[in-house]
Amino acid sequence: MVFQPFGAEDKDIFDKYFKETDSRHCDMSFASVYLWKGYYPCTYTIYDNMLIFKGEGEQVSFSFPIGAGDPAKAVEAILEFCEENKIQPAFHCLTRDHEIFLEEKYPGRFQFEFDRDEAEYVYECEKLIGLRGKKYHGKKNHVNKFKKSFQWAYEEISDENREECIAMLADWKDDNEDPGDDEKLAEVCACKRALMEQESLGLLGGLIRADGRVVAFTLAEKINSDTIVIHFEKAYSDVPGAYSIINQEFLIRNAQDIPYVNREEDRGDLGLRKAKESYHPIFLLENGYAYEK
């Protein structure tokens, strides 16, 4: 197994294996691994028709094999690679099915951890588009108030308005910057790169104008056969309803025929958790780790 770095030119290779896996998880996307590789460095290999990522951080870990091949052979090859290179075997981005697989094949060998902070929120698109019923009454009010307060418009992100989104992102960074939060800074960098390389990454994008000014934007992609994932969503917190309206208006235009939307994790941010829970997820996608005991 030879692991190597990757770049934008490898998108078609990765897309093939992600499509075969048909996962709803946000990390099962070329855009995710590509945009975040500066903060979460990784390399990859193809083994027996399976894609495998190797996390290059302080704790080396491997993705569960991705694709339509035989995971048993690929996992065994990973364990042999670890033994040869004196690496403690560890896996990241595990599902509960992966946990069952590893425990059945290697009973008692691994310790499993699933962190609530990394669970991804999945919603029904129809519910977030319609905002019908008592539990969405507050969200509907936010949207209606925004529409009454501003001359507003929705636009697809394009070369004509991209620089305005980048400028808004810089403002958002200044308003929300935390010098000790490296991950938030990395997110801003990843978001800017996503805006600049949107077309080549195959991302969908939309923005909201209020009185002529861009006040919110979002970047997303259809990640599998039934789910769209929101990779980035930014809005001015001092513009009431800006987050609510970009959420709804983007899905109206891009997810009418898609059952689910994955709005990713909250990373333990209690304010963000409250906001995500207020939209009433239909389920959470767990993300786990396995470490050899």
Image (cartoon, rainbow, N blue to C red):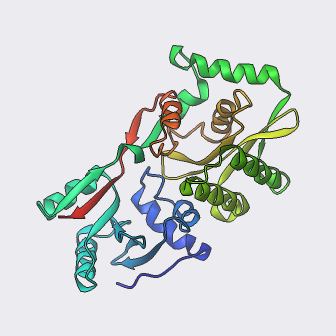
Residue ranking furthest to the right: 212
Q: Position of residue 223 (x, y in %)?
A: 52, 53
Q: Is residue 254 left or right of residue 283?
A: right
Q: Position of residue 277 (x, y in %)?
A: 47, 30
Image-quadrant location for residue 244: top right
Residue ranking furthest to the top: 134
Residue depicted at x 55% and y 71% = 12
Query: Camera-side residue: 2 or 51?
Result: 2
Q: Position of residue 180 (x, y in %)?
A: 56, 54
Residue ranking furthest to the front: 180
Image-quadrant location for residue 246: top right
Residue depicted at x 38% and y 71% = 52
Q: How many labels sit on residues?
A: 0
The vertical placement of 72 against 115, above or below, is: below
Query: Camera-side residue: 66 or 84?
Result: 84
Residue depicted at x 51% and y 60% = 29
Q: Position of residue 80 (x, y in %)?
A: 23, 80
The vertical placement of 257 against 134, above or below, is: below
Query: Camera-side residue: 224 or 230?
Result: 230
Residue depicted at x 79% and y 42% = 155
Query: Camera-side residue: 37 or 174?
Result: 174
The vertical placement of 8 against 151, above or below, is: below
The vertical placement of 271 against 262, above or below, is: above
**Considering the image in quadrants, where does the N terminus appear?**
bottom left
**Considering the image in quadrants, where does the C terminus appear?**
bottom left
Q: Is residue 193 left or right of residue 61?
A: right
